[in-house]
Amino acid sequence: VLRLDLRRMRRLRFYEPGDLTAGWDAGATVAEVKAALAAHGQFLPLDGGGGAATLGAILAARRSGPLRHGFGTARDFVIGIEAVTAAGEIVHGGGKVVKNVAGYDLMRLLIGSAGTLAVITGVNCKVFPALAATETIAFTLADFAAAERLRSRLLHSPLRLIALELTDGTVGGTRTGADGAEGPAAITALVRFQGSEAVRARYRRELAAIAA
């Protein structure tokens, strides 16, 4: 098994706050990316690996967290990629601008390839305005059928959620019923949204109506 450690490759290659684009070495961590962008009121919706995870590792494994509901996966906001092949060749896909359709789409090929095709060494991304105040509401559901009904209603509602996640009994442990018997914990749906207090109050009302 060959293990590559790219954590020394962590520089910020470029950053254009006005264009909402930035590029890093693949060894840059999520925490470092967030700190650089936060200074300009921007962020990158990567929440699938924790603050210590590197950009290269997240892309190689195609990790996604709950924010993929509102922003998509890494494939949706990576606009350029640099990688080194087994032959030692440096290859590039995409570029530094959002609208770039030149050449083969190496980005989608390499993201999720787990390093089997090439080692990702650089990443360019489109970034986003920082989130406003966020709020998460938890709904307790009896079973997956109820979870699917809630999901369908949320997807067909006008609400623009930034995250939607389910936890089942294997995550939540056990619960004790009225007869004293223990069984799987209820399924919990975690719904996250953002906005001013007035906007979040409207979301709370509409979510309560949808979940009723």
Image (cartoon, rainbow, N blue to C red):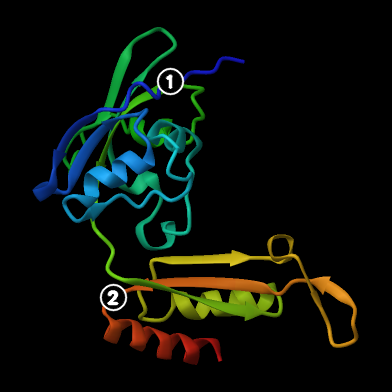
Q: Quadrant of residue 188?
A: bottom right
The numbered disc on residue 118 is 1
Tally of marks: 2
Q: Residue at x 56, y 92 (%)?
A: 212
Q: Position of residue 12 (x, y in %)?
A: 22, 32
Q: Residue at x 43, y 71 (%)?
A: 192
Q: Position of residue 148 (x, y in %)?
A: 60, 74
Q: Amino acid at mark 1?
A: Ala
- As displayed, is residue 89 above or below residue 74? above
- As displayed, is residue 28 above or below residue 64? above
Query: For mark 2, does the 10 Å Cα neighbourhood hold few (<14), some (14 to 19), or many (20 or more) residues?
Result: some
Q: Name the residue that disc number 2 marks.
A: 195
Q: Position of residue 176 (x, y in %)?
A: 82, 78
SS at badge 1: loop
Q: Residue at x 13, y 47 (%)?
A: 17
User: Quick check: 62 left or right of 18?
Assistant: right
Q: Position of residue 28 (x, y in %)?
A: 34, 32
Look at discs 2 and 1 and give the one toward the viewer. Answer: 2
Q: Residue at x 34, y 88 (%)?
A: 202
SS at badge 2: loop
Q: Amino acid at mark 2?
A: Gly
Cα gap from disc 2 to disc 1, whole angstroms: 41 Å
- As displayed, is residue 209 above or below residue 58? below
